[in-house]
Image (tube, rainbow, N blue to C red):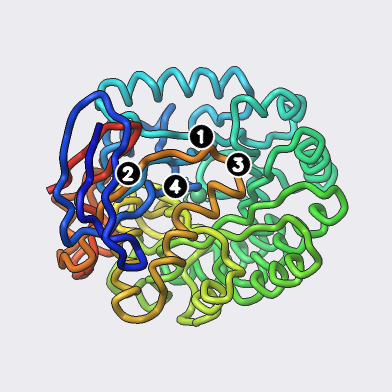
Amino acid sequence: MIHISDALSIDGQIQNLSIASHSDLSIDAEGLTLFPGLIDPHVHFRVPGMDYKEDWRSASKAAIYGGYTTVFDMPNTIPPTCTVALLQQKKELIDAQLHEAGIPLRYQLFLGADKTHLREIAHAKEFAVGIKVFMGSSTGGLMMDDDESLQAVFELAAAHQLVVAVHAEDEKRLRDRQQQFKNSRDYSDHSKIRDAETARIAVEKAITLARRTLARLYITHVSTAEELALIRQAKREGLSVYAETTPHHLFLSTKDYAALQGKAVVNPPLRSPDIAVWEAITEGVIDTIGSDHAPHTEAEKAKPYGTCPSGVPGIETTLPLLLTAYHQGMISLQRIVQLTSSRAQEIFHLAHTEDAVLVDLNKKMLVMPERLKTKCAWSPFAGRELQGWPVYTIVQGQCFPLF
Ligand code: DOR
Ligand code: ZN
């Protein structure tokens, strides 16, 4: 058993609790606040095929150091995870790497939607937490932009009770705008190419399909007021439409290109400063925060615009960023728990666990690249002083002291 004494609950009550474990351990948690194990519904842990960017030995450590005990991994690997056989192969690789790391991280996998493998959806329920559809091109070759295939995915997902998770950027508009900016060497043009309208068109299409098929729809990395207006309306209609946003869309903006250069390039892109997403968080229109942990090497991110890959790491800094926002009065601890754990559990029907994180709400620490566990070893938040860090993460009865 793990015995935790004198922890604070998020509403300030003193709490003692015991968690089933093979080892016997007592933690004096005086001054620490107890959170449920966090769930990150959106990570790219790069196995198979891109282990040089990240693997599950490094990524599971990064997750634990971030307070996460469950992650959902995306299918844009090499090869893309778009069949049940590939899901099973991926699972074997992951289990071996987690075993090597000695970290029993919980995980779920998304099946990648691919028009030549639509039949896989009927058999995916047991192996996948949902189906991921890239409506516009991003990292990797997965992409589905024809209406017929999209409709088929939504119908099959509805029939087999699978959530459809969409990367909502419209491929046609994206291509047109890439053409217009084709000689650009300016990283910040990324936000002009993949503009708000590019996201709006795709979200509108996805919601129309959800309305027509009654599929459950999870819209990843929502970053604009335009998307939020459509999502708010869909929720009012009673559709099962859920919205995720990311730490980089909450804590970075187009102003950060100047300092970060290629490290600010991500899909969907950083937006001009705007409070729309923060308002939607307070209002409850945003359901979850996914880190969209998408590591690339520093050398890759230093390439000129056009060849520099999109994506930023994030799983180690999401909770400290949110806790810092809590100290600034921007969000409550209750809301942080909903966004980083309980809503994902509800939406994706995950079983309750005893996983827990003990957090020192007052601990101040700089984000230091050399301290990060992600293999890519950089962060767009490097140098920020954040207040509120996980101190112990407990997953499947195993306790990891982090300091
Ligand atoms: O910026 C991004 N990076 N957006 C995505 O959709 C994919 C991700 C990646 O896998 O690198
Ligand atoms: Zn992603």
Which disc number belongs to residue 356? none
Which residue sits at x=35%, y=51%? 315
Q: CA distance from mark 1 to mark 4?
A: 10 Å
Q: Amino acid at mark 4?
A: Ile
Q: Nearer the viewer, residue 259 or 84?
A: 84
Whichever of labels 2 and 4 marks the residue nearer the N terminus, that label is: 4
Quadrant where the N terminus sits is: top left
Q: CA distance from mark 2 to mark 4?
A: 10 Å
Quadrant of the rendered structure where residue 206 is? bottom right
Q: Which residue is mark 3?
A: 349
Secondary structure, mark 2, is: helix
Whichever of labels 2 and 1 marks the residue nearer the N terminus, that label is: 2
Q: Which residue is mark 4?
A: 39
| Mark 4 C-beta to ligand 2 under 8 Å | no
Q: Amino acid at mark 1?
A: Gln
Residue 116, compared with residue 367, is above or below; it is above
Q: Which residue is mark 2?
A: 63
**Along the horizontal axis of the image, is 343 left or right of 373?**
right
